[in-house]
Image: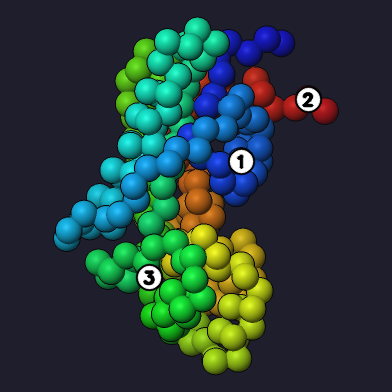
Amino acid sequence: MALKYKLILASGSPRRVDLLNQAGIEPSRLMPMDIDETPKKSEHPRSLARRLSAEKAEAALAAIKGDITWKGSYILSADTVVAVGRRILGKAEFADEALSALHLLSGRNHLVYTGVCLVTPDRKIRQKIVETKVRFKRLSGFEIENYLASGQWRGKAGAYGIQGLAGTFVQKMVGSYTNVVGLPLYETILLLTGEGFDVHSRWPEA
């Protein structure tokens, strides 16, 4: 069956692609947007997730302006922020940043916020912010050292990906698991279906 609408994912994250695939959705195009993700002074982590997801969607919309191929497409973007209190833990690029983050997360609760933004074919903007509370066990120096050696912290908010080795650090979680991975599936599908995107027609037949 021909599908009426195309979906652009304003992200290059393999994890977000995998999650959409899990829901039976194959994005028509990946458009990672290179925007400044620096928090503003005193910006709350929730506000940062909301702002960055909107800016990514708006940047993708501007990038396809005038391109008839993508006229009428949906644009989906997301941004995930990890925070201890109001302290935002950015994407770790260096081992010392990851080490600092892991020491901070060890033995305590933190919050993961994901802002999801959807631009509809008639250019309405819809957003949801999802929050999950995660508690790490107290990490030993040996665990931290071995996790750093794995390299799985690189480029990840809070220096960890719950779908990898760091999943063994999680003592308790309240809220959406897929939110911590990077795209809260329930809320994302709710946004899409609420705006007329036929998710279920894309499910494979037995």
Q: Name the residue under label 3.
A: 110
How far from the left and from the top, in percent, is residue 28?
61, 24
Can you tell which of label 2 and label 3 is closer to the viewer? 3
Label 2: state its secondary structure. Answer: loop
Res 90 → quadrant: bottom left
Q: Name the residue under label 2.
A: 205
- Assess disc 1: are there few (<14), some (14-19) or many (≥20) residues with their C-alpha within 10 Å of its C-alpha: some
Which residue shows up at 64% across the image and 78% down it?
A: 149
Instruction: Determine the CA span between mark 1 and mark 2.
Output: 21 Å
Residue 144 as seen in the image, left or right of residue 158: right
Instruction: Determine the CA span between mark 3 and mark 1.
Output: 25 Å
Which residue shows up at 28% across the image and 51% down it?
A: 48
Which residue shows up at 37% across the image and 30% down it?
A: 59
Res 56 → quadrant: top left
How far from the left and from the top, in percent, is residue 38?
30, 54
Q: What residue type is labelled 1?
A: Val
Assign the C terminus to one quadrant of the image. top right
Instruction: Determine the CA span between mark 2 and mark 3.
Output: 40 Å
Q: Mark 1 points at which residue?
A: 17
* Count of numbered tags: 3
